[in-house]
Amino acid sequence: MKSEYFVRAILFVAGLAAAIVGIGIALAPDVFYASYQMLLPDGATVRSELRGIGGFLAVSGITIFSGAVWLSQRAFALRLGILLNGGIVLGRLLSFAVDGTPSLPMLSAWTFEVATFVLLLGAVALNSTSQNKNLRAA
């Protein structure tokens, strides 16, 4: 039972974080990126790209969050969370290697993303274990 609460808590936090970031990027990209010490160039093209990514993050976050609420969504939400966070973590690692070290706020975000990714991997293992126990009990 404790493992179910852990899985739900991780999905709640991971989903909420992705949704908040996505909404921030979609609705106010200049403000959002200023928090990372980044100034966006003028023009609709950059904002269109960022708002699209923001929308994707927001919808993904809501879907991940849904796994904390509905058992029927849990396995999909865990897989989506791992793909989303794993992709972000790997992309930032590539950037570190190619572009160098980013600002401290960006490093802080990456640390949160790595922790979330690792916790989601643990949640998948716990969720699989609890599902196997339920199958044996039936």
Image (tube, rainbow, N blue to C red):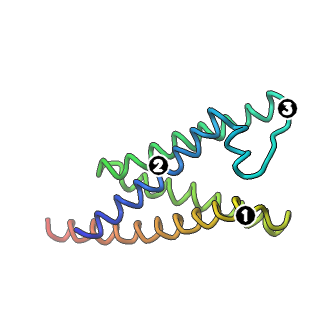
Task: Check disc 1 and give the amino acid type.
Answer: Leu
Q: Find the distance from the CA under tag 2 to the CA under tag 1.
A: 22 Å
Q: Name the residue under label 3.
A: 42
Considering only order in the chain, which callout, 3 or 1, is on the residue closer to the N terminus?
3
Front residue (pair 72, 17): 17
Quarter of the view holding residue 53: top right
Task: Check disc 3 and give the amino acid type.
Answer: Asp
Where is residue 84? Give x, y as percent: 57, 54
Where is residue 136? Give x, y as percent: 19, 71
Q: Mark 1 points at which residue?
A: 104
Q: Name the residue under label 2.
A: 16
Where is residue 14? Give x, y as percent: 48, 55
Asked whether, in this view, residue 97 is left or right of residue 79, the answer is: right
Quadrant where the C terminus is found in the figure:
bottom left
Front residue (pair 42, 119): 42
Asked whether, in this view, residue 109 is left or right of residue 7, the answer is: right
Q: Find the distance from the CA under tag 2 to the CA under tag 3.
A: 30 Å
Asked whether, in this view, residue 100 is left or right of residue 79, the answer is: right
